[in-house]
Image (cartoon, rainbow, N blue to C red):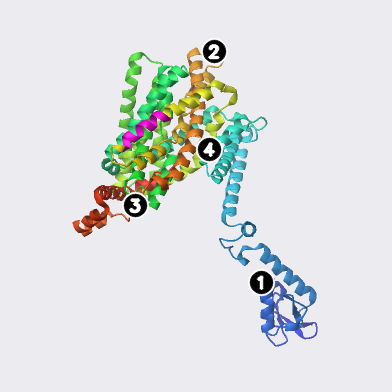
């Protein structure tokens, strides 16, 4: 109840509550009006709109409203009105809630102006959140690690390489190039530009360990993506495309490297299998896009290429790992011959036992089984890879990692396809964070001081010779599954980009020899290790060149030629339609589609059963 009143001006009293905390102005027509404080807090409308409402309610006369602003009226003093109008204009200028989202046709300045409104929202808020997270994590590591995290330290170098790799990725995507090229260039610049060589402070052991973790993630994703149903349906095409071009290219590159670069035979073939694997990071997203828009789906081109890429990556990684293990073996010739079978046996036993255990642990009734599956699978893979290196059976680790993921995923896919897809999605998210770390560190591993000029020229020639052999064999492989010449040409181009495996394993030989020579500091350095280290520098250089050359060619080739070489499919006959409608519907489709419809129906059934695979294998 009002207990005190006072008058402002001539006609408008202000009635206050007993405690004086709230006041209400009584206007000339007897209607209450909020105080200046409440008007400021509640003022969300445009100043002109509020003034017009005042006119309609008789609070401000029409003659007192000029040029869109309320002038001094009988119930409001001039300073108060001016201040209220200014505050409202300021709110409208800086608050996002008082502005409308600009339309798609708005100018760039209008979109920028809306982006800068408060509070932060949209992409600006997303990026500021990232900056805040990185800043707090950095301060945490500074408090924990001291000089290691300060400028010039090991962790400082890792942080800057990762951040610059992310920036480089966005720049590359802006100019329509694969993002991994921007990551590589960022790492390379941080290693070789005078004055900013922060990557030189990164310890080789840390760099090698982080790349090994990225390898585990890639292998787990590859194992989860291997769908036995798809492999059975397209077994002939997948087998030919996965093994024939890569084997021929590896042999050709090995022979040329032996005579052109004077590599030993073993290390020449190590280089061959390093360069042969196609990149899922470039291929799979493009194939998923084709699947969505219906290009090449009728002939099963996207399904064939995605399935074959997973198998080829596993094949190339395993052969490379076995050859690498044999090359660094210090045992007798008999043990070197037996090392490959021993490693394969270890991988099969470990992968089968651990994968089978993950069928039952965690239990299907466990409330957090999804999180536990993710953690257990990742831990099993890291144990396999790092444990194999410790036990001097480095070739067993990658194969065991793939077998574990494949064995576990086989049961998960059958019993709980949604949970299987969720696990693969979680691995994809983890890979998204490790991708700039991997490619940034690979770029930072290339030092101009260690590169010989002739290695670049001969390496480029070697890459194109290997690509020529690959392009000659790919048509033979895909022709066997009944593709026409346009689809064969597209498959040949799509089967050329390299990046992921080359980035992961490119520095493997150099890392191993560098660590081995560091352990023998102060002693007589092994001449054999020094020679292998030179091979490792050349392998790393050629691997980076391979990424820089083939990834843009493959990505641009797929984008530019997909509409010209592939046919957009008619609405497909789903597996459920064929089963529920009986032979009549299929006969009608056969009459409309001609001789290729039987094959399309089979491929559609295969695609329906492999939908989870197509949406979880992307890199």
Please report the residue visible at 20 percent of the width from the left and 58 percent of the height from the top: 584
**Residue that mark 1 sits on:** 46
Q: Secondary structure at mark 2?
A: loop
Q: Main secondary structure of the magenta part?
A: helix
Q: Is residue 475 a member of the stretch shown in magenta?
A: yes
**Residue that mark 4 sits on:** 181
Precedes in sequence: disc 2 or disc 1: 1
CA gap between label 3 and label 2 equals 67 Å
Q: Residues within 10 Å of mark 1 (few under 14, many from 20)?
A: some
Q: Secondary structure at mark 4?
A: helix
Is residue 564 or residue 588 the one in the foreground? 564
CA gap between label 1 and label 3 equals 53 Å
CA gap between label 2 and label 1 equals 80 Å
Res. 389 visible in picture:
yes
Precedes in sequence: disc 1 or disc 3: 1
| Label disc, if present, on residue 523 of the rendered structure | 2
Magenta residues, start to end: 467-478
Instruction: Using residue 78 as the reference point, say whether residue 472 is left or right of it.
Output: left
Please report the residue visible at 43 percent of the width from the left and 29 percent of the height from the top: 275
Residue 14 is situated, as x and y percent measured from the top left of the image, at 74, 81
Precedes in sequence: disc 1 or disc 4: 1
| Label disc, if present, on residue 15 of the rendered structure | none
Please state which of the two labelled residues, at mark 2 or mark 1, is closer to the viewer: 1
Q: Secondary structure at mark 1?
A: loop
CA gap between label 4 and label 2 equals 40 Å
Please state which of the two labelled residues, at mark 1 or mark 4, is closer to the viewer: 4
Instruction: Using residue 382 as the reference point, say whether residue 522 is left or right of it.
Output: right
Q: Quadrant location of residue 24?
A: bottom right
Residue 232 is situated, as x and y percent measured from the top left of the image, at 26, 41
């Amino acid at each position: 109840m009002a207990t005190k009143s006072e008058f402002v001006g001539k006609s408008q009293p202000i009635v206050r509550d007993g405690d004086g905390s709230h006041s209400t102005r009584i206007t000339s027509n007897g209607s209450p009006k909020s105080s200046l404080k409440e008007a400021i807090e509640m003022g969300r409308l445009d100043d002109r709109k509020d003034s017009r409402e005042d006119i309609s309610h008789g609070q401000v006369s029409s003659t007192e409203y000029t040029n869109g602003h309320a002038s001094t009226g009988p119930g409001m003093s001039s300073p108060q009105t001016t201040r209220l109008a200014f505050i409202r204009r300021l709110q409208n200028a800086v608050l996002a809630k008082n502005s409308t989202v600009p339309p798609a046709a708005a100018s760039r300045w209008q979109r920028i102006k809306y982006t800068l409104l408060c509070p932060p929202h949209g992409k600006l808020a997303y990026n500021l959140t990232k900056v805040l997270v990185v800043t707090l994590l950095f301060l945490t590591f500074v408090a924990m690690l001291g000089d290691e995290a300060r400028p010039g330290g090991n962790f400082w170098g890792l942080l800057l390489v990762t951040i610059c790799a992310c920036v480089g990725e966005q720049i590359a995507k802006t100019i329509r190039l694969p993002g991994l090229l921007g990551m590589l260039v960022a790492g390379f610049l941080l290693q070789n530009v005078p004055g900013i060589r922060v990557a030189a402070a990164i310890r080789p052991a840390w760099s090698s360990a982080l790349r090994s973790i990225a390898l585990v993630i890639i292998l787990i994703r590859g194992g989860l993506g291997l769908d036995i149903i798809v492999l059975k349906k397209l077994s002939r095409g997948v087998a030919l495309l996965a093994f024939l071009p890569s084997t021929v290219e590896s042999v050709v590159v090995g022979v040329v490297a032996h005579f052109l670069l004077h590599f030993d035979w073993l290390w020449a073939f190590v280089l061959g299998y390093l360069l042969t694997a196609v990149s899922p990071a470039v291929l799979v997203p493009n194939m998923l896009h084709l699947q969505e828009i219906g290009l090449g789906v009728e002939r099963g081109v996207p399904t064939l290429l995605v399935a074959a890429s997973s198998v080829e990556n596993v094949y190339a990684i395993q052969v490379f790992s076995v050859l690498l293990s044999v090359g660094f073996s210090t045992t007798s010739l008999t043990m070197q011959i037996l090392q490959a079978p021993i490693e394969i046996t270890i991988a099969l036993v470990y992968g089968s036992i651990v994968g089978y255990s993950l069928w039952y642990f965690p239990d299907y009734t466990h409330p957090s089984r999804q999180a536990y599956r993710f953690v257990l699978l990742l831990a099993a893979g890291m144990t396999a890879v790092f444990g194999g290196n410790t036990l001097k059976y480095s070739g067993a680790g990658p194969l065991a990692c793939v077998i574990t993921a494949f064995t576990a995923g086989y049961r998960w896919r059958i019993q709980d396809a949604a949970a299987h897809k969720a696990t693969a999605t979680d691995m994809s998210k983890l890979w998204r964070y490790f991708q700039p770390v991997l490619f940034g560190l690979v770029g930072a591993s290339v030092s101009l001081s260690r590169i010989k000029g002739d290695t670049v020229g001969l390496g480029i020639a070697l890459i194109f010779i290997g690509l020529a052999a690959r392009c000659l064999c790919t048509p033979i492989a895909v022709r066997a599954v009944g593709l026409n010449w346009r689809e064969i040409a597209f498959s040949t181009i799509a089967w050329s980009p390299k990046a992921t495996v080359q980035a992961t394993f490119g520095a493997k030989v150099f890392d191993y020899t560098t660590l081995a020579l560091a352990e023998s500091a102060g002693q007589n350095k092994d001449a054999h290790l020094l020679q292998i280290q030179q091979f490792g520098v050349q392998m790393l250089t050629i691997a980076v060149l391979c990424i820089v050359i083939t990834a843009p060619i493959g990505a641009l080739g797929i984008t530019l030629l997909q509409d010209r070489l592939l046919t957009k499919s008619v609405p497909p006959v789903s597996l459920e339609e064929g089963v529920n409608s009986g032979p009549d519907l299929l006969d009608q489709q056969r009459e409309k589609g001609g001789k290729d419809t039987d094959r399309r129906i089979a491929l559609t059934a295969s695609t329906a059963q492999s939908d989870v695979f197509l949406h979880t294998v992307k890199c």
